[in-house]
Amino acid sequence: MLQVTCAIIQHADKILICQRSASMKLALKWEFPGGKIETGESKEECLHREVKEELNIDIIVHSALTMVEYHYAEFSVQLYPFVCSLQSGEVNVLEHTQAIWVDAMQLPNYDWAAADIPIVVEYLSAKQFG
């Protein structure tokens, strides 16, 4: 089972979302940026490294949301989401088709990778009532 982190990056009342490239698994689905946890790496270290590698930005990790376990046809994933904020840098898309800043209330309008859907729901619920 893949152990993966993802970052819900907040900046100026917007959230950064990324569209997977046509050559990736789950092609053209939307997701929060992140990636596989390497041996000996904390979840937070993984997030910092992956976001830097994929988007060339630095983030501040604030809080964890509920882990999502999801079984796709080809693989299974444990996805560890964290609410983060942009610390520095300009987004430079290095792996995805695109990365865009959207209003949080627009998140349900995108075609998300299935494992990310419960994260969108939890984040919006916490934002609405938190």
Image (spheres, rainbow, N blue to C red):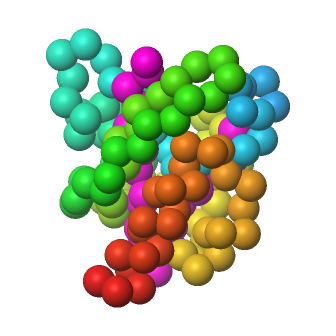
Q: Indicate the position of residue 119 as horizontal and vertical percent values.
A: 47, 57
- Residue displayed at 63% across by 45% down: 114
User: Of helix, strand and loop, which mostly describes the magenta segment?
Assistant: strand
Task: Tell me: 82 left or right of 56.
Answer: left
Name the residue nearer the viewer: 112 or 60. 112
Q: Indicate the position of residue 44 as horizontal and vertical percent values.
A: 23, 40
- Residue displayed at 34% across by 45% down: 67
Task: Tell me: 125 left or right of 37.
Answer: right
- Residue at the right extreme? 22
Task: Tell me: 17 left or right of 69.
Answer: right
Quadrant showing the C terminus = bottom left
- Inspect this view and state whether residue 91 appears: no
Q: Is residue 69 magenta?
A: no
Q: Is residue 2 magenta?
A: yes
Q: Indicate the position of residue 7 as horizontal and vertical percent values.
A: 40, 50
- Residue displayed at 67% across by 52% down: 112
Q: Which region of the structure is painted magenta?
A: 1-21
Quadrant showing the N terminus = top left
Q: Indicate the position of residue 34 as horizontal and vertical percent values.
A: 45, 38
- Residue displayed at 22% across by 60% down: 62
- Residue at the top extreme? 39
Task: Tell me: 103 left or right of 97.
Answer: left
Name the residue nearer the viewer: 77 or 25. 77
Q: Is residue 25 above or below residue 81?
A: above
